[in-house]
Amino acid sequence: MAEAPFGLLAELTHRCPLQCGYCSNPLELVRRDAELSTEDWRRVFDQARSLGCLQIHLSGGEPLLRPDLPSLVEHANSLGCYVNLVTSGVGLSRERLHSLASLGVDHVQLSLQDATRAGNDRIAGIKAFDRKVEAASFVLDEGLPLTVNTVLHRQNLDNIAGIIAMAEQMGAERLELANTQYYGWALRNRAVLLPTREQLAVADPIVAAAQERLRGRMEIVYVIADYHEAHPKPCMYGWGARQLTVAPNGDVLPCPAATVISSLQIENVRDSSLHDIWHHSPSFNAFRGFEWMRDPCRSCPRKEIDFGGCRCQAFQLTGDAAATDPVCSLSPERSTVDLILETEMAPAEVPAMAMRKMR
Amino acid sequence: MTVVALDAVPRIRRGVKCTYDQIRSAHVVLFPEGVLVLNETAASVVALCDGVRSIGDIAVVLADSYDGVEPSDVAELVARMVERRVVDVDG
């Protein structure tokens, strides 16, 4: 039997007031009428807890758009789970946050698109900056710990020092600076988003210095730009190892981006229990452990560190989900990534950002 | 490496939740983006990180239930918890 998962990423809805082009949600967003009901979600939380999940990340899209959010928070909390609210901050009034906190939200993760109002709102596609600053103050006043999340890319990487200063000013105790991962809308917008080597060379030491300077006050988690690296990221710390995702329509995913792997037979909470899906489904067992690997991964000592990288990325860039993640310098397909870098880091003509919208 | 003095007073950080997991039959600490599964000794120490007792006090309390508890062992365990951002120390 596989070990029990620790976390459930509950994507309550794909609806979102923001239109960020770096979003990793799929291009084909789940529409409101296909979303799970309140009862469905309560059952999913029950099953997740019985399976071993201790953390429930309420995410989306924007979870505040679900009118049943308070009852879902209350239910997750009643199961003894750590309840993490992942939000854009848009729609979070002082009263609403107070109510959610009293029902059991333990921690708030607030997205920030850029250091300045103009930059933030250009990336978000709506005027959201002031609402975020306000939301951060509500979280602080409520006495909840705050993490600020910023996705980094060519459009905001030059402002990294300002982003760190902004997170400090907002009172965050954690800052996640995550270079864009290219799935869904971000993949579509890759030629607008891929940072240049020069940008990363300037940003990396700024982040390192801030990590040192702010030690003990604000923890900075830095997620690397994997296309630029020699080794892949340890995606999900292994397939079907620690966490599972339930999409707004009830699809159960080993990785939030797993719908891209067209050969994968995705299960749904409307048809099976999370227990059966986690332990027995072909999708969760497809890339579990090390048996599925071929060389260069199979004989590589780094397989214990990076688990062969990301299956979704391997599928997207090579057409084979069981291939070594092609960002790896040992991958026979690394030239594909190098070609992408060469042509998309500084394209002669930069395309317009495709803003994230329901079709 | 974090070093914790014997007169330091540890407390569970804000936003950190300690609970018992029936599924794993273990005490666990839940915090933003992380879970720690504790052994029995670690769970006893964490439960006493109340912002009042010092490391030395905690060692005295634990000596009632466990043989050979040294304050330095408690300090070392608390230091690991500080590094994982589960516990803060004053003083």
Image: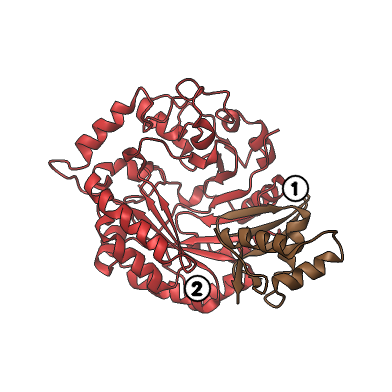
Tell me if residue A108 comes above or below residue A331 in the rendering.
below
In the figure, what tint was chain B given? brown
Amino acid marked by disc 1? Arg
Please tell me in which quadrant of the rendered image residue B60 appears: bottom right
Q: Position of residue A158 (x, y in %)?
A: 24, 57
The residue that disc 1 covers is B24
For label 2, the SS is helix
Q: Quadrant of the N terminus of chain A?
A: top right
Answer with left or right where residue A9 lies relative to residue B77. Answer: left
Q: CA distance from mark 2 to mark 1?
A: 32 Å
- In the image, what residue occupies the spot 35% across and 57% down? A207
Please tell me in which quadrant of the rendered image residue A183 appears: top left
Q: Residues within 10 Å of mark 1 (few under 14, many from 20)?
A: few
Amino acid marked by disc 2? Val
The residue that disc 2 covers is A139
Q: Position of residue A160 (x, y in %)?
A: 30, 60
Q: Residues within 10 Å of mark 2 (few under 14, many from 20)?
A: many
Do we see residue A159 in this rendering?
A: yes
The numbered dot on residue A166 is: none
Tag 2 subunit: A
Number of residue marks:
2
For label 1, the SS is loop
- In the image, what residue occupies the spot 64% across and 73% down? B8
Q: Nearer the viewer, mark 2 or mark 1?
A: 1
Please tell me in which quadrant of the rendered image residue A274 appears: top right
- In the image, what residue occupies the spot 55% across and 45% down? A245
Answer with left or right where residue A122 lies relative to residue A64. Answer: left
In the figure, what tint was chain A given? red
